[in-house]
Amino acid sequence: MKRRSAVLALALAIPLALGAAVVTRHPPTAAAAHGPLAQNADQTVTARLVYGLLSNSRYAYRAQPLNDALSKEIFKKYFDALDGNKMYFTADEVAGFEAQRAGFDAAFSNGDMKVPFAIFETYRKHARERIAAQRALLNQDIFTFTGNDRFEYDREKAAWADKATLDQLWKQSVRNDWLRLKLAGKQPDDIRKTLDKRYANAIKNVDELDSEDVFQLTMNAYTNATDPHTDYFNPRAAERFNQQMSLSLQGIGAQLQKQDDVVIVRELVPGGPAAISKLLRPGDRVVAVGQGASGAMEDVIGWRIDDVVEKIRGAKGTRVRLGIVPPNAPVDSKPRVIALTRDIVKLTEDAAKGEVINLPAANGMPARKVGVIKLPSFYEDFSARRSGNDYASASRDVARLLTGFKAQNVDGVVLDMRNNGGGSLGEAVRITGLFVDTGPVVQIRQSGGRVEVDGDDDAGVTWAGPLAVLVNRGTASASEIVAGAIQDYGRGLIIGETTFGKGTVQNLVDLDRFPSTRKTQFGQVKMTIAQFFRPSGSSTQNKGVEPDIHFPVTVDASNFGESMYDNALPWSSIPAAPHQQYGVFGSILPQLDASHEARIKSDREYQWLLEDLAEFKALKAKHYLSMNEGERRAEREKNETKLKTRQAERKRLGLPLDPLADDATDDGLAGSERDIAKEAAREKLAENRPDPLLRESAAILTDAMGLLAHDSRLASQVLPQSGNAVTWVR
C-alpha cells in the first residue's frame, strides 16, 4: 500500500496493553534531550540479521545483492520516508548526501548506521528551524488574501528545491493554515494562539523521535527497496501487527491518543475491563500510572504515547492503577485514581459483520432479502489456534454469519471486501471453501520455482445460493485470492473496481530466533517468500482482479495499487489447476450492465457519489489551493449549500439521512486539536452513512437471480452445474 511520510505517520492512536512485558525506559528520551542520536548494539545485530535474510535466496522470493543499483533505491526511499513532500532538504543537500550513499551499504552489511543517522540529524535540525520560523511568521503582516497566489500542497512528485523556494512554500503553508481558520469564523488572536500551539506541538513531536524510530525508518528503506511488501517491525511494531492479526490483546481495553502533552482516552473496547468497570470514559486524561495495588504512581504528562501504553499494558490478571483527570477539569487538578484488572480483550469491532438489505418488488420482480458480510481483513489468532483454545478466525465468523442468513431465508449474499488489505492465507482458503466444494483455491510458487496448490478439502458448502463479491482498489492480497477463485469457479459475480494487484505471499520471520535469545529485542521481518496464482493460472500481481460489473474508479491506479511501485514483480501466469466451473456469466453481463446503468440514473445517492468523485479528482489534479479568500469562501459556501440541499432532498424522498451532513464543514483544525471523544463518536457515525455502492451491488445480484429464474434455457447455459453445488435459481 502507498505510504505517507513515515516520520509523520508515527502512531497517534495505539490500542493499549499489547503484551505482558514492562519496559522501564523513562522520558526524557535521547531525542527530547536534543542530543545526537546513535545506534545501539541490538540495532547493529538486527541490521546484519535482516541483511542475511534479504540477500539469501533460501529465504527471500527475490533475493537481491546489496549492489550500487539497490543502494540508490535505498537512498531514495530513505529520503522519501523522511521528507516525502520535499519540504525540508534542499536540492544541494540531497546531492551532497548522494556522495555518502555508499555508506548505506555498510549500514546493513556491517550494521554501521552513521550515514542514515547523520541524514536524520540534518532532517531534525531543519524541522526545528522550519517550525520555529512558522511560529515567527504568525507575528508578521502576511495574512491578507486578495491576490492570485497559490499554496502548492502536494510536492511528492516535484523536484528538490532551493532554500528560497522552500522559504516561500513554508510561508504559504502558514498562510493556508491561517486562512482555513479564518474561513471557519476564528478571530486573529484565536488563530494566532491555535497555530502557535500547533507548531509548538510539532516541534515536540520531532524531538520525541528516538534511535528506534530512525532505525526502523532506515531498515524499511532497505526492505521496501528489495520488495514493496517486505517490512521490518521493531519489537513494539511487531507486537501491534500480531495484535491486529489475532484481534485480541491483554490489557484494559481502551485506545489512547495524545493531545498536547497529555494522553487521552479515545474510546473503550466493548467488553474490555475498562468498559465493564464504568470507571473510565472517552475524553478522560491519563496523567499517572501505577503498577499493582501499591506501586508508585508515575507522572506520565509529556511522555511519548507508546511509553504510556507500555506502562498500562500487561498480563491478564494483573492490576494497574491510573490517575485520571476528567475532560472539563484543569489538567493540573488532583487526579482520581482508579484500579483495573487486565484481561484478554477481543477486538470485535474489527471482526466480520453482517446485515440484511431489503429490496422492494420492482419491474415484475419480487421483493428480495440480500445478506451482506463486511469483511475488513483475514484475521486469525495463530497462537491460540495452535494451542487449541478458542481463537479469532475470519472464516469461522463468516460461516456463522452465513448460517444466520440461511435461518433468515435471505435470497442472496454479498461478500463486501472493499478496502480489505489481506491477512492470513489459510483464512482466505477456508473462506473460499464456504462457497465452493472441494478444489484448488490458490497456487503458490516458491522462490525455487516449485508450485504448490492449496485448496479446500472439506466436502460441501456453507452457502450454496446466489453470491456477489464487492471489491475496490483497496481490495488486496488474500482478498484478491478469494475474489479470483470465486471468479475462476464461476461461483459468483465480482462487482466494483479493479483490485490492488498484490500477488505475493509474506511470512513473518522472528529475528530473535536466530541468536537463540530469550529476550524480545530484534523484532520481526514481514518478508515476501512466494507468489500466488489463481486456479486459472493467472496472477493477480500488478493486474489485480477485473470485476464482471464495473463501478466508478475512486482512485487513480498511478497513485494507489501495485502498479505504482517501480520495483513490483511483473504479471505472469502458470498452468491452470483443474477446478469445477459452476457458472459462466459472460452471456448475462450486458443485460446486467444495462439494468445497472438504467437504475443508477434515478438513484440520487449514486449520482451524488459520481459528482463527488468528479470534484475530488479535479481538486487532486490541481495539486494546489487558491490563496484568494473570496475564491475559497465561495467554494466553502458552495459545499455547505450542496450538503444542505442533499439532506433536504433525502428527507423529501424518504432516503436515509447522512448522519454527518450537519457537521461536514472544515473547521480549520488539525485532527489532534479536536475533541478526541467526539471525533471517535463521529467516526462511528460515519459507518452509518448511505452506501449506494453496496445497495447497488445487492440490486445487481437480484437482477441476475431474476434473469436466471425467468429463462430456464439461459439458466442452463449460465449455470450448467447448478443442480450439483449451487442454487441460484429459486
Image (cartoon, rainbow, N blue to C red):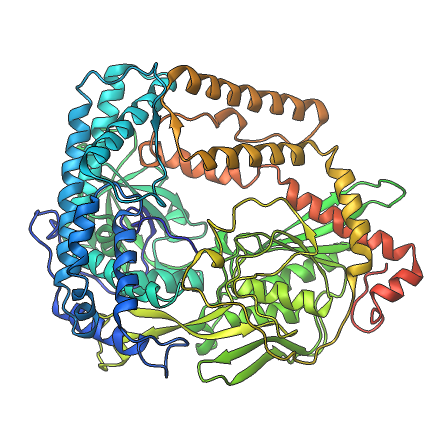
User: What is the x, y in percent for residue 45?
Assistant: 18, 74
- Image height check: is 541 above or below 173? below
The answer to whether one can see residue 315 in this image is no
Is residue 646 shown left or right of residue 11?
Answer: right
Nearer to us in this view, 85 or 728: 85
Residue at image position (44%, 72%) is 382
- Image height check: is 429 above or below 449? above
Nearer to us in this view, 604 or 403: 604
Which quadrant holds residue 291? bottom left
Quadrant where the N terminus is found in the figure: bottom left
Residue at image position (75%, 66%) is 464
The answer to whether one can see residue 466 in this image is yes
Residue at image position (49%, 51%) is 349
Quadrant where the C terminus is found in the figure: bottom right
Which quadrant holds residue 431? bottom right
- Image height check: is 333 above or below 705? above
Marker count (numbered)? 0
Is residue 290 shown left or right of residue 487?
Answer: left
Residue at image position (36%, 24%) is 180
User: What is the x, y in percent for residue 606?
Assistant: 66, 36
User: What is the x, y in percent for residue 42?
Assistant: 16, 70
